[in-house]
Image (cartoon, helix red, strand yellow):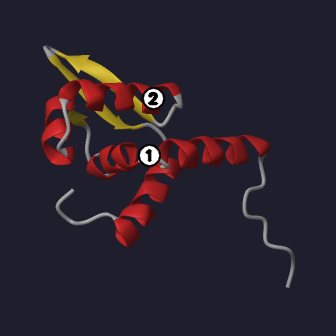
């Protein structure tokens, strides 16, 4: 058998590293698990994750600066979603192994 290429492109390695570093915080992983299948308003993320709005907003900002999450304004709501389908797959796999169904 030939050599298995896990990550062929340098940009994929960088993206994976950025995503894994961002997920290394328990609250950020919970946020990503909550966002796995949805675009959600910040207040709904707060309710699902169970922390203060300011704390959740700070962690969403970190995820946004790492290009993991994107957000948009809809009226008076800020809606967030996972930006990259590769990160979405990674979160899905992490959730299948580690995240409870309630998150």
- 69 left or right of 87? left
Answer whether labels 2 and 1 touch (C-beta < 8 Å). yes
Label drawn at residue 85: none
Q: Nearer the viewer, residue 92 or 98?
A: 98
Q: Which residue is mark 1?
A: 25
Q: Residue at x 62, y 48 (%)?
A: 16
Hey, which quadrant is residue 10 in on the image?
top right
Identify the secondary structure beneath mark 1.
Answer: loop
Establish if 84 lies above or below 66: below
Q: Earlier in the sequence, mark 2 or mark 1?
A: 1
Q: Position of residue 25 (x, y in %)?
A: 44, 46
Hey, which quadrant is residue 99 in on the image?
bottom left
- In the orientation shown, which residue stands out farthest toward the right? 2
Q: Position of residue 47 (x, y in %)?
A: 12, 41
Q: Residue at x 18, y 37 (%)?
A: 46
Q: Nearer the viewer, residue 37 or 65?
A: 65
Label drawn at residue 62: 2
**Crowdedness near tag 1: few (<14), some (14–19) or many (≥20) residues, C-alpha within 10 Å:** few
């Amino acid at each position: 058998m030939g050599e298995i290429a896990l990550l062929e492109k340098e940009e994929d390695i960088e993206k994976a590293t950025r995503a894994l570093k961002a997920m290394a915080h328990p609250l950020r992983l919970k946020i990503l698990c909550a966002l796995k299948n949805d675009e959600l308003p910040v207040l709904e993320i707060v309710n699902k994750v169970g922390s203060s709005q300011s704390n959740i907003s700070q962690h969403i900002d970190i995820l946004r600066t790492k290009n993991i999450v994107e957000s948009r304004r809809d009226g008076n709501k800020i809606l967030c979603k996972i930006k990259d389908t590769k990160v979405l797959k990674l979160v899905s796999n992490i959730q299948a192994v580690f995240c409870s169904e309630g998150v």
